[in-house]
Amino acid sequence: MPGNVKQYNRICLAYGYTDLRFGTGGLARVVQGHFSLDPFQKGCLFLFCGRRTDRIKGLLWEGDGFVLVYKRLEAGRFQWPRTASEAREATPEQFTWLMQGPAVILTEPVKKFWAGISCVCYNCGMEKIIYTEGELNNAGRDEVAGTILSLQENIAQMTQNQELILEQIAGCRAHARRKHADALKAIKDEKERKGTLAYDALKQIGAIYKLDNDLPGLTPAQRQHRRQQELKPLVDAYFVWVKKHQGEVLPKSPTGKAFAYSVNQERYLRIFLEDGEVPPDNNAAESTLRGFCIGRHSWKLIDTIRGARSSAIIYSITETAKANDLKVYEYVEHLLAEIPKHEDDTDRDFLEDLLPWSPNLPEQCRKSNKYEVK
């Protein structure tokens, strides 16, 4: 790999992973198609790294043809940035550091500007800016290393209350049930299944589900109160029973693994008792995502981050509309008709009436209730 920085007018690093099996044509298409940059910039060196960080490739246009360079380290590895799938421009100092091994922090994307480093605490929502764009660009090598250390210290400081953060994660009781069901399926003779520990576990989990399914139409506060009164004793009894019998089975057996899962996830499997808005499992989310996963082959042409984000926004809107019993086509048509009317508005309160759960949506957007008595 030519190490003389002065011979290059510009140096761009392709963040993330690139298939190094590509030759000059393939890498040029990556530069042009994925990063929307011109690979025919004379004196511009594009650098790529694959899954293995001990080797990199470079592509350089010299006016009459491409030069393909390749470097593989005998020992050690490159600290290649993996945080984003985009091209970022490197300064001569950063290029030198990369060739020598230490990690490089680039803050000037070629296509998309990103200033500074920030860390967000998911518990309180607090955001800590470590460096602004100007400070980081002018920082020396030692200051960049200090920036990484400061970021780590701030993360540690903001996650001191880790217990509270973890308590906000709810476990899926269907996963716990599934492990017991798999243990029961391992018993070929159906007559022998009754009376087994897996059979008894499924009966207890089924009783919890039955009671929770009998609480429709309640407010979150009412559901939480009923769960505390009626479900909590069953949940407590289940975990007492699991811990009592856990030592009776082999840890690597299907029943042993099912018991271990319930014990390890106990704190998360209890979260639904504390919040009436939390379901006992994530079956609804998995059912919603199933159609998306089945149809993923239909949108393989989405090969940019911006396109993926746009698709994610559209799918979030349509799936939320489905969850609120709306006709997706009519609802999206209503949005496309109403939002342009407020393009010049500085007040965004009108969006409240367009949300999928708004009572002010027109009736043609709602699905008819087939059980409604007319």
Image: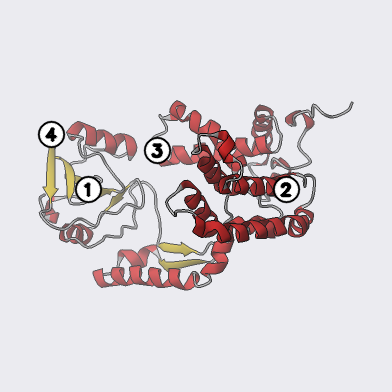
Q: Amino acid at mark 2?
A: Asp
Q: Is residue 121 left or right of residue 216?
A: left
Label pair 3/4, CB-CB below 8 angstroms: no
Query: Residue at 53% of width from left, 61% of height from top?
Result: 122
Viewer-proximal residue among 132 and 83 = 83
Foreground label between 3 and 4:
3
Query: Residue at 60% of width from left, 44% of height from top?
Result: 199
| Label ID, residue 212 | 2
| Label ID, residue 304 | 3
The secondary structure type at the circle numbered 3 is loop
Q: Can the viewer see residue 235 in this picture?
A: yes
Label pair 1/2, CB-CB below 8 angstroms: no
Q: CA distance from mark 2 to mark 4?
A: 69 Å
Q: Amino acid at mark 4?
A: Gly
* Mark 2 neighbour class, 10 Å CA radius: few under 14, some 14 to 19, many 20 or more: some
Residue assigned mark 1 = 52
**Location of the C terminus (image quadrant):** top right
- Quadrant in the picture for residue 367: top right
